[in-house]
Image (tube, grey):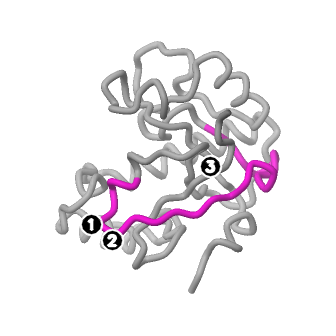
Amino acid sequence: MHDWNAYHYFEQSLGPFKNLSSLSADEAETVTQKIRLQGQNFASRRPADYMAIRRTLEQRAYEQFVAKGGKPLQSYPHYLTLGSCEWLSSWYSEPDHVIIPWGNLPVEVVSFTYGDLFPTMRFDDAKPYRKQIYTKDEIIEVIQTYGWPQEWNRQGDKGPERYIEVQVWDERIIQPCTRD
């Protein structure tokens, strides 16, 4: 039996859902540079143009989701995984996570990629799930066809897809999980 809950991993001292995309370009660059200089986790290896690429990919995801009938309430998503992914805990010195049940993910404000948005939208390896945003119904079919990356690619040696990503396009969904 698989876990259909959405998980968000974060640094315990910072709290959940600290989103670079919610910041101005200058603020986001300052935070990104600070992460790079600390050099303690996976995020510190992001390229210098990370935020520009991220905003472009988020716009592409937004447009695809709207074309499929999605009704996002903000221009950028909050990121979670479908099912747990222990690998993401390794990104943080003091990891923590929150869980949002499948039933609390409204179809009109939640999209999915088979893998992290970055490699999914950028890799050109002809895998049929590349460059695709999926709806809630569609991701079920994709999982039935390809399985759970958390299972078949635990070590990351079979490609960049390590988990199924959930994009939440509505602050109200994450609000119960946030703290000041």
**Magenta segment boundaries in residue numbering:** 89-112
Compared with residue 16, is residue 7 higher up or lower down, i.e. above or below? above
- Identified at 59% across, 43% down, the residue is 83
| Residues at discs 1 and 3 in contact (Cβ within 8 Å) | no
Q: On the image, which quarter does residue 8 sit in?
A: bottom right
| Residues at discs 2 and 1 in contact (Cβ within 8 Å) | yes
Q: CA distance from mark 3 to mark 2?
A: 21 Å
Quadrant location, the C terminus: bottom right
Residue type of the residue flagged with mark 3 = Gln
- Identified at 36% across, 21% down, the residue is 158
Q: Residue 111: where, in percent of width, then height?
A: 68, 43
Q: CA distance from mark 2 to mark 1?
A: 6 Å
- Identified at 48% across, 34% down, the residue is 150
The disc at residue 31 is: 2
Q: Nearer the viewer, residue 156 or 121?
A: 156
- Identified at 46% across, 66% down, the residue is 96
Q: Residue 77: where, in percent of width, then height?
A: 60, 55
Q: Residue furthest front?
A: 1
Residue type of the residue flagged with mark 1 = Ile
Report the mark closest to the observer, 3 or 2: 3
Q: Residue 177: where, in percent of width, then height?
A: 64, 71
Q: Which residue is mark 3?
A: 167
Q: Which residue is mark 1?
A: 35
Q: Secondary structure at mark 2?
A: helix
